[in-house]
Image: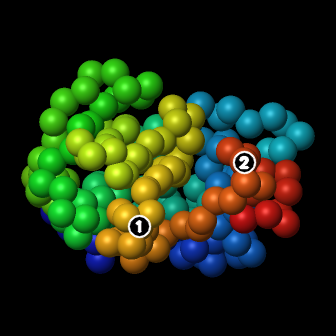
C-alpha cells in the first residue's frame, strides 16, 4: 500500500486540467457520482476533461460522501497532534456510532469508513454531506491553537459568505 506521497491535491488537479482554481474542481466533480448539479451550473466539458486527465495519469477522483485513504492518514496525524487517542465515529447523520482509535486512521491495512467524527470533549467536529466531496472541519479556539487544519489538509477557511455551493456558478468567492 502507498502512503501520502501518492496523493494528488485538488490544486494539482486544477493545474493538470488547466483550471484557474480548486473552485473549478469542486464544480467539476459534482457531475460525477450522484450528478446532483443543476444544468445551469454544470460544465460537462470540464468534468470530461478532469476525468480524462485522471484516467491518463491513474488518478482516482474523490468519492462522494466518504473519506479517502489519504484523508484518513491526515486525520490520524491531526488527531494525534491534538492528543486524541480515540474519537466517536459515525455514518451519515450521526447514525451507527462507534469508538475509533485515532491510530487506526494511520494504519493503511485497516479501513475505517467514517463520515462524521468528534472527540469526547467536542473540541473538534468533522463531517461530509452525502453528496459532497469535501469535509467540513470545525474546532474550538483551544483546539485550533493546538493544531491548525491548514498544516494537515488542503482547503480554505469558510466565512459567513461561504455556502455549500462554493465555486459553483460564482468564481469570485472562496
Q: Residue at x 84, y 44 (%)?
A: 41
The residue that label 1 is drawn on is 144
As drawn, the residue found furthest toward the front would be 142
The answer to whether residue 40 is left or right of residue 163 is right
Image coordinates of residue 142 in percent, x first then y, are 37, 64
Q: Which one is in front, 61 or 150? A: 150
How far is disc 1 from disc 2 in space, using C-alphas?
22 Å
Is 125 or 73 nearer to us in this picture? Answer: 125
Tell me where residue 1 appears, x and y as whole percent: 16, 62
The residue that label 2 is drawn on is 163
Q: From this viewpoint, which residue is outermost toward the right?
A: 40
Q: Nearer the viewer, residue 68 or 46?
A: 68
Rendered position, 166 above or below 132: below
In the rendered image, the vertical position of residue 143 relative to residue 124, given as above or below: below
Identify the image quadrant of the C terminus.
bottom right
- Expressed as whole percent of the image width and height from the top left, the position of residue 50 reads 62, 60
Find residue 108 and report its image quarter.
Answer: bottom left
**Which image quadrant for residue 5?**
bottom left
Tell me the mark number nearer the camera, choosing from 1 and 2.
1
Q: Is residue 155 something one can see in this rendering?
A: yes
Q: Secondary structure at mark 1?
A: helix
> What numbered label is drawn on residue 97?
none
**First-in-chain label (1 vs 2):** 1
Q: Is residue 95 left or right of residue 2?
A: right
Label 2 neighbour load within 10 Å: few <14, some 14-19, many 20+? few
Determine the residue positioned at 33% across, 45% down.
122
Badge 2 element: loop
Residue 67 visible in rendering? no
Q: Residues within 10 Å of mark 1 (few under 14, many from 20)?
A: some
- Residue 103 x/y as whole percent: 11, 57
Amino acid at each position: 500500500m502507498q502512503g501520502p506521497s501518492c496523493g494528488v491535491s485538488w490544486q494539482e488537479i486544477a493545474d493538470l486540467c488547466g483550471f484557474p482554481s480548486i473552485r473549478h474542481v469542486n464544480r467539476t466533480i459534482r457531475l460525477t457520482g450522484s450528478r446532483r448539479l443543476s444544468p445551469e451550473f454544470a460544465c460537462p466539458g470540464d468534468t470530461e476533461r478532469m476525468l480524462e486527465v485522471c484516467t491518463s495519469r491513474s488518478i482516482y477522483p474523490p468519492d462522494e460522501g466518504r473519506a479517502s485513504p489519504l484523508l484518513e492518514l491526515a486525520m490520524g496525524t491531526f488527531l494525534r497532534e491534538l492528543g486524541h487517542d480515540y474519537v466517536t465515529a459515525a455514518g451519515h447523520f450521526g447514525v451507527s456510532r462507534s469508538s475509533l482509535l485515532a491510530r487506526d486512521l494511520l494504519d493503511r491495512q485497516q479501513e475505517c469508513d467514517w463520515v462524521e467524527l468528534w472527540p469526547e470533549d467536542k473540541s473538534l467536529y468533522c463531517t461530509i454531506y452525502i453528496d459532497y466531496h469535501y469535509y467540513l472541519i470545525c474546532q474550538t479556539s483551544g483546539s485550533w491553537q493546538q493544531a491548525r487544519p491548514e498544516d494537515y489538509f488542503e482547503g480554505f477557511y469558510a466565512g459567513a459568505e461561504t455556502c455549500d455551493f462554493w465555486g459553483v456558478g460564482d468564481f469570485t468567492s472562496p
